[in-house]
Amino acid sequence: MIILIAGSSRTGKTLLAQRLLEKYQYPYLSIDHLKMGLIRSGCTNLKPTDDNPVLTAYLWPIVREMIKTAVENNQNLIVEGCYIPLDWRRDFDERYQPSIRFICLGMTDEYIDAHYEDILRHESEIESRPEVPDCTKERLKTCNRHFINGFRDHGEDVLLISDDYEQTLGTFLEQEAWLDQ
């Protein structure tokens, strides 16, 4: 089983991946770790500050083939990151799609307004992250809307956080039926 977790920065993709690892004992790959490994090793001229479309175009083909290899080897893997293209399904035929589960995490504008300070306070809950000075409420809202609308337009499920973050995530994790879809 492959579990893909997408969404805007600061939505808790890594937290969800960690909780799924703890629950199912599936290993997980952070696409951010792959990105930084390639950048720091000098294997690419990309920079951490490159635009999302540039990073997605470079990273997704590598991640896509890792997913195919895991499916072919009958291995479980959680993959999380914001570099999963909206039309990711086009890259997997009927041999692969039954083994892939997808979820996008998103936060409503109202949630961001009400919990902005909490979002910033918890951004390093699983991994230490440097402060990003341009992480404004409006930027968070814009990025979240991009992922929510984009993935919904492509027929994907979005786990929308609109009230209680922990309760929403907990309820989702209790519903194992989504793994069987």
Image (spheres, rainbow, N blue to C red):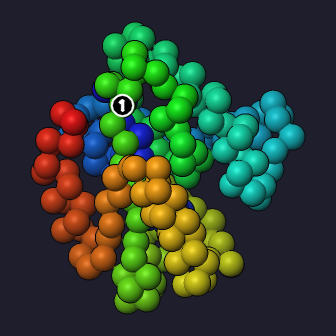
Q: Which of the pair 85/50 is nearer the observer?
A: 85
Residue drawn 81% across the image and 30% down it: 43
Residue drawn 41% across the image and 40% down it: 4
Residue 66 is left or right of residue 161, and the answer is right
Residue 19: % across, % down: 28, 48
* Residue lying at the far bottom of the rendered structure: 114
Label count reads: 1
Q: Is residue 115 visible?
A: no
Picture layout, residue 74 above or below residue 170: above
Residue 131: % across, % down: 63, 72
Q: Is residue 24 visible?
A: yes
Q: Dot 1, how many residues are within 10 Å of its Cα: few (below 14), some (14-19), or many (20+)?
A: many
Picture layout, residue 139 above or below residue 103: below
Quadrant of the rendered image containing residue 84: top right
Q: Which of the pair 2/134 is nearer the observer?
A: 2
Residue 172: % across, % down: 20, 55
Picture layout, residue 96 above or below residue 149: above
Residue drawn 13% across the image and 51% down it: 174
Q: Secondary structure at mark 1?
A: strand
Residue drawn 31% across the image and 31% down it: 26
What amino acid is labelled 1 in the image? Ile
Quadrant of the rendered image containing residue 42: top right
Q: Which of the pair 50/155 is nearer the observer?
A: 155
Residue 2: % across, % down: 36, 30
Residue 181 is left or right of residue 27, and the answer is left
Query: Which residue does the numbered mark 1 point to in the structure image?
Result: 100
Quadrant of the rendered image containing residue 170: bottom left
Residue 18 is left or right of residue 67, and the answer is left
